[in-house]
């Protein structure tokens, strides 16, 4: 199950990003790597921008922490 944190829900509204867009990115990322504190980062390209989604796994669920648009992915690993 994909669960959006309160912060992620707030940022969805502020940034005009739909839950469906985030879910699509999670199901089919272009890039995926580990981050700090057991977090994962994915990037999915949409036209000229990349959607960056930060999430963590908890009890088999995907907890979305935040998401935002970037011009190009930052692929440096922690």
Image (spheres, rainbow, N blue to C red):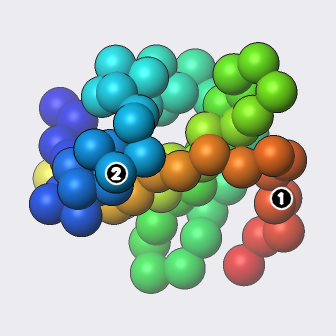
Viewer-nearest residue: 14 or 39: 14
Q: Which residue is mark 2?
A: 14
Can residue 63 be seen in this snapshot? no
Where's residue 77, x and y in %?
Answer: 78, 70
Q: Residues within 10 Å of mark 1 (few under 14, many from 20)?
A: few
6 displayed left or right of 76: left
User: Relative to 40, is 26 above or below?
Assistant: above
Calculate the distance from the C-alpha at mark 2 to the C-alpha at mark 1.
25 Å
* Vertical relation: 55 (above or below) 36: above
Q: Identify the disc placed on residue 75.
A: 1
Image point (83%, 58%), residue name: 75
When asked about the image quadrant of residue 3, the answer is: top left
Quadrant for the C terminus, please: bottom right
Give the residue drawn at x 17%, y 32%.
1
Q: Where in the figure is residue 73, as x and y percent of width and height?
A: 80, 50
SS assignment at label 2: helix
- Considering depth in this image, is 51 or 54 the residue closer to the camera? 51
Q: Are marks 2 and 1 in contact (CB under 8 Å)?
A: no
Which marked residue is nearer to the observer: mark 2 or mark 1?
2
In the rendered image, residue 16, in percent from the top left (x then y), is placed at 39, 36
**Disc 2 packing (10 Å; few <14; some 14–19; many ≥20):** few
Total numbered labels placed on residues in the image: 2
Question: Measuring 23% from the left and 56% from the top, which residue is drawn there?
Answer: 10
- Mark seen at residue 45: none
Under circle 1, the secondary element is loop
Residue 53 visible in this rendered orientation of the protein: yes
Q: Residue at x 28, y 44 (%)?
A: 13
Answer with mark 2 or mark 1, whichever residue precedes in sequence: 2
Q: Is residue 10 left or right of residue 12?
A: left
| Relative height, residue 13 to residue 8 (above, below) | above
């Amino acid at each position: 199950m994909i669960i959006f944190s309160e912060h992620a829900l707030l940022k969805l509204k502020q940034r005009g990003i739909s839950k469906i867009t985030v879910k699509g990115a999670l199901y089919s990322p272009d890039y995926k790597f580990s981050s700090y504190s057991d977090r994962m980062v994915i990037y999915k390209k949409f036209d000229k921008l990349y959607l960056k989604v930060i999430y963590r796994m908890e009890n088999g669920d995907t907890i979305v922490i935040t998401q935002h648009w970037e011009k190009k992915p930052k692929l440096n690993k922690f």
